[in-house]
Structures are given as C-alpha cells and as structure tokens.
Image (spheres, grey):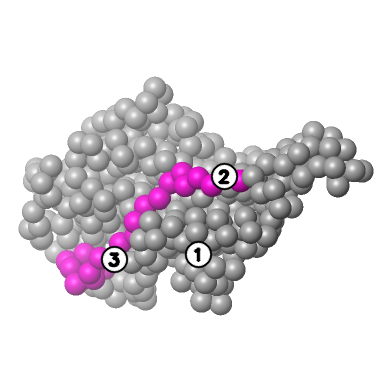
Amino acid sequence: MTATRDAIWHAIDPTRLHETLMEMLEIYSPSGKEEDIQLYLEDRLRQAGFAVARQVVEEDRYNLRVTMGQEPPQLYLVGHVDTVTAWDLEEFSPHEEEGIIYGLGSADMKGGCAAMIEAFFALAGLPEEKRPPVGLLLVVGEEENGDGSATFLTGETPPWVVIGEPTSLAACFSHYGYLETGLITRGRRTHSSLPELGHNAVESMLRVLLHLGRHPLFNRKTPELVYSIRELSSSRAGFVVPDRCEAWIDLHLPPETDPATVRQAMENQVEGAVAFIDNLDMEMSFTFDSQGYRLDTDNWLADELAETYARLGLPLKFDAFRSHSDGNLFFEAGVKPLILGPGSLETAHTSDEQTSFAEVVAAARIYAALCLAVARTKEPSPAP
C-alpha cells in the first residue's frame, strides 16, 4: 500500500494543479450561474479519459459525477463549484503573491475542488482493476440552498464523503448546525424634518436587535453559539422617516444544539420587546435550519489521516466545522461526512479571499491517500 501511495503522490503534478485552479478562478460562477465552470471542468475531465455524467438540477444547472473502481463508490470527494456573488469583479480577480493564491472561491472552495480533481488525475494512472471504488462529485448551489447535493442524494447515499470546505486542513468530523432568521419592522413614513409625526422602522429594528442580543444564548463572552447580524437595510425613498427595515441573522449552533430550541428562545425574547417598544409592528421568519452533528473519530478514515499526515510531516488537528455546508445534508441522509480542505474561513466571501498553494497540493495528496484506503475497508453502504 505504501508503495502505491507514494507512486500516486509522485503522479500528482503541481504544475497541472496550479493551472486547473487558476483557470477555475478566472471563471465567475456565482450560485445559479455555474454552467461555464461546469463546462470547463467537464472538458478537462473528459480529456483525462474520464466518463463524466451530468446530473441535472434544473435547466442549465447540473452536477458532474465521475466514478472509478469495479464496485459502487464507498467514498465520494465532494466539492461545490459555485461562489457567493461578487459586488466588484475587479476586486475579486485572481492573482498570486509569494505562494498565496487570491481570488473569489480560492478557499471556498475552488482550491478544494482543484485538489480533488488532481487526486483523480493521479489515481487514473492505476490499472483498471486496482482503482479504488470512489467517486468525484462537483455540485452546484451550495452557497444558496444546497440543491446540487440534495439532487445527488435522491439517488445515491455512499457510506462516506469528504467535502473540501476550507478548514486549513483540519479534519472536521463534527459540524455546527445553522439557523437563518429574518426580521421586518414597519413604521409610518413622514418627512424627515418631522419625525415625531411618523414611526421610524429603523429605530424599532435597532431596539429589537439590542433586546434580542441580551438573551443569555447570545452572550459573546461565552460564544458557543455564533450570533451574527448579517444584513440591515431600510426603505430608500428620499428625505423621509423610513417605514420599513429588514434584518437577517445567521446563527451557527454547536453540534448538540437543537435549532428548534434556539428558535423558540428567539421567539420568546422578541415577544417581550412589545412591552417597551411603542407601536411595534414586526414579523419574524425562520427561512432555513439544519441540525449539527458529531461523528466518532474512532474510524478507518481518522486512522488513515493520522498515518497520511505523519508521512507528509503535517500536524493533524480534529475540529468542528463552524460554518454551514452541504455536510449537514449528507449527514441527515445517513452519509458520514468529513469536512477537510485547503484555505480558511477567515477570508472566505471577502475581496481578500486566499489559500496557500502548498495547502492545495497537500490536500490533493491527502484526498488521494483517503481514496486508496477505501480499498482496504469493508464498510457496508447505507440502505437506499
């Protein structure tokens, strides 16, 4: 096994990997508009000799699926090709400085996708009968509602997936849950020189948010639960008192925390705001939630990681993935997800998004080693 792994690692080509990543970064692929990058990746995979299957999500949107081995895949490498929307493409343009690659999606998660593709290129050098039973899945829509992964899961539930979200190569067998909340306050519009005749929806919203933030759940001194006001906007209609204000809140929940418990606590706290905010007209909605999870690290994948990281001279850290990802969807479907990829969440979604190219190369070697290890494990597939 060691000789095979070393041969595969030798077949990983940093120059080819660098080319793949930089060309991916040049293609703008926000959620909902992923066709250009999928066409590029499909062509690149076909030229390498792979049979690439399209998995239609909706018109002009599809996943790409590649498998190898003589049995159904026991593990999939999963990457999402979409990014958040760029407010200024020039600010997000790709470039490289001293081994650090910048650009929209460099960490989240085109770096991980490029590493997975390179791992598959290297594995393709094995004789057909020696290729492990693994798959490569490049999905759309992760940054929105996860419709790409949801589509895949309607037809297939492998035992394991490795998702290349940015973790700085930490191995995340645990995952935070997520709750997205929307608030709307309404007021009465008047000329801004006569605010006493109107009702300011922004002031109402600020009071509600301050009251909500006083709940013990959202105490930042004990930040187990991550509470972030993501957006705040009001009506724009000239020199007037605003009659509408909207806020969006992201909550990332520790693995054992039930989103329903947090939701009830928020509803109770907001209801209490009526007592001290005059004429409060407000609605609250919960648009998305997912339960976190914690997997046992006593498994063959963790054992292989320990050996692989030691061989690469890398420190192995087990962690919980703090953001939202398709990992929650896979776990709910009965699949065991490992979140592991190059880059970090710190700069993701910003104009300073970046990843170390050395981490991308290391990720390709880690992914290849995990794929090779599949051939040595006999874990049954979940029931369809």
Quadrant of the rendered image containing residue 253: bottom left
Q: Camera-side residue: 132 or 298? A: 298
Q: Camera-side residue: 300 or 266? A: 266
Residue carrying label 3: 294
Figure check: 18 above or below 169? above
What's the amino acid at mark 2? Glu
Measure how far apart labels 1 and 3 are at the Cα level: 17 Å
Q: Camera-side residue: 219 or 53? A: 219
Q: Which mark is residue 283?
A: 2
- In this rendering, would 226 be left or right of 76? right
- For the N terminus, give its image quadrant: bottom left
- How many numbered circles are shown? 3
- Residue 17 in view: no
Q: Which marked residue is nearer to the observer: mark 3 or mark 2?
A: 2
Q: Camera-side residue: 197 or 335? A: 197
Measure how far apart labels 1 and 2 are at the Cα level: 22 Å
Question: Callout 1: few (<14), some (14-19), or many (20+) C-alpha neighbours within 10 Å?
Answer: some
In the image, which residues are magenta?
A: 282-305
Residue 182 image position (x, y, % from top left):
55, 47
What's the amino acid at mark 3? Arg
- Residue 70 in view: yes
Q: Give the residue displayed 8% in from the left and 54% down from the top.
A: 380
Residue 137 image position (x, y, % from top left):
30, 42
Q: Which mark is residue 377?
A: none
Mark 1 or 3, nearer chain start: 1
Quadrant of the rendered image containing residue 229: bottom right
Figure check: 66 above or below 62? below
Q: Which mark is residue 226?
A: 1
